[in-house]
Amino acid sequence: MKISVKVIPKSSQNKIIGNIKDGSIKVKLTAPPVDGAANKALIVFLSKELKIPKSKIQILKGEGSKNKILSLDIEKP
């Protein structure tokens, strides 16, 4: 499954704040956008929120951007 995410780094809390008009999910993260810290924090945060292993989440596009496309390897029962 692929999802679009807009990341807002250096926020006061880690939080999914909803969908935006283009269908992306907006996520606030406390991590700064330095040396991949926000990317790592995004994967850890989504892993906990979605209850899937970090290894099942991959950034396909946008590692240096606020707008990212992620691949989630979610098994369907």
Image: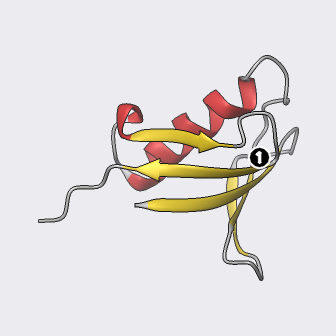
In the rendering, at what x and y percent does residue 16 appear?
Answer: 66, 61
Question: Which residue is pictured at 85% across the width and 21% down the height?
Answer: 34
In the image: residue 11, left or right of residue 21: right
User: Callout 1 environment at 10 Å: few (<14), some (14 to 19), or many (20+)?
Assistant: few
Q: Quadrant of residue 20?
A: bottom right
In the rendering, at what x and y percent does residue 59 appear?
Answer: 57, 40
* Figure disc tally: 1
- Residue that extends furthest to the bottom in the rendered view of this protein: 21
In the rendering, at what x and y percent does residue 28 appear?
Answer: 77, 52
In the image: residue 14, left or right of residue 31: left
Colour mapping used in the image: secondary structure
Q: Of 61 and 46, which appears nearest the observer?
A: 61
Screen quadrant of the C terminus: bottom left
Q: Is residue 57 above or below residue 2?
A: above
Q: Of 60 and 76, which appears nearest the observer?
A: 60
Label 1 amino acid?
Gln
Question: Which residue is pictured at 82% across the width and 42% down the height?
Answer: 65
Q: Quadrant of residue 62?
A: top right
- Residue that extends furthest to the front in the rendered view of this protein: 61
Residue for badge 1 = 13
Q: Is residue 8 above or below residue 18?
A: above
Question: Which residue is pictured at 79% across the width and 16% down the height?
Answer: 35
Screen quadrant of the N terminus: bottom left
* SS state under label 1: loop
In the rendering, at what x and y percent does residue 4 appear?
Answer: 63, 61
Q: Is residue 33 above or below residue 71?
A: above
